[in-house]
Image: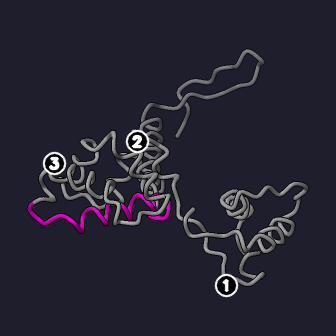
Amino acid sequence: QQPTTIHQTPTGRPFALYPQSNCLTMKSSLSALLLLLTPMLSLGANECEVCIKVMDDVRETLSKADSRKKPEIEKALGAYCADPDAKLTARERKICYYVSPIKRDVAQPFSLGMTSLKVCERINKSNPEICTVKFPVKTDKMEKKDISKLRVKQLKQILADRGVECKGCLEKEDFVKRVQETEHLSTDEF
């Protein structure tokens, strides 16, 4: 298509203005691209794994009829988090700590029948820390070649969970070695 007018920038470079139909085509192309990328921006199941487990556990305690009633959902959340016999892990207790003040906000999407992942994504908007809680990487019975496949970020998290610093660790191999040396400090409670 031919440009409608040719102009010059302040530096003297020429540029052309095209008819408005090209602008609309570009805008619609960008809109289509954004629609394609939007599903990729949502959180994955492994991002909110602890929250999903807690929501699934609470859902199991409710009858089908009660899972549609907000007050019943709030009671079930409270009972799940307060139950001393439940033997919740530290990470599950942390989710309970985050969810307790916003039970009503959790009950709304829960009552609509949303999946646990969608409920966690929704409440993650009000408290972004919810989906940062993850289960620890199990390193017991892992061989060195398997540990070396982990990312440095994961290795650092394992060491942080064990309360170990890795001073002087510069290379990935240093972190792998330190994880293996501190194997005796690993617990499932973290």
Inspect the image, locate mark 1, and give the three-letter code of the amino acid beneath it. Answer: Lys
Q: Eyeballing the image, is 56 above or below 75?
A: below
Viewer-nearest residue: 117 or 178: 178
Q: Which numbered dot is residue 13?
A: none
* Colour setup of the view: one colour
| Horizontal side, residue 21 vs residue 169: left or right | left
Between discs 3 and 1, the one toward the N terminus: 3
Q: Is residue 64 covered in magenta?
A: yes
Q: Secondary structure at mark 3?
A: helix
Q: Secondary structure at mark 2?
A: helix
Q: Quadrant of the C terminus?
A: bottom right
Residue drawn at the location 49% of the way across and 64% of the way down: 46
Residue drawn at the location 38% of the way across and 65% of the way down: 53
The spot of residue 158 in percent (x, y) is 68, 63
Circle 3 crowding by C-alpha within 10 Å: few under 14, some 14–19, many from 20: many
Disc 1 marks which residue?
141
The spot of residue 173 in percent (x, y) is 85, 69
Q: Main secondary structure of the magenta part?
A: helix
Disc 3 marks which residue?
70
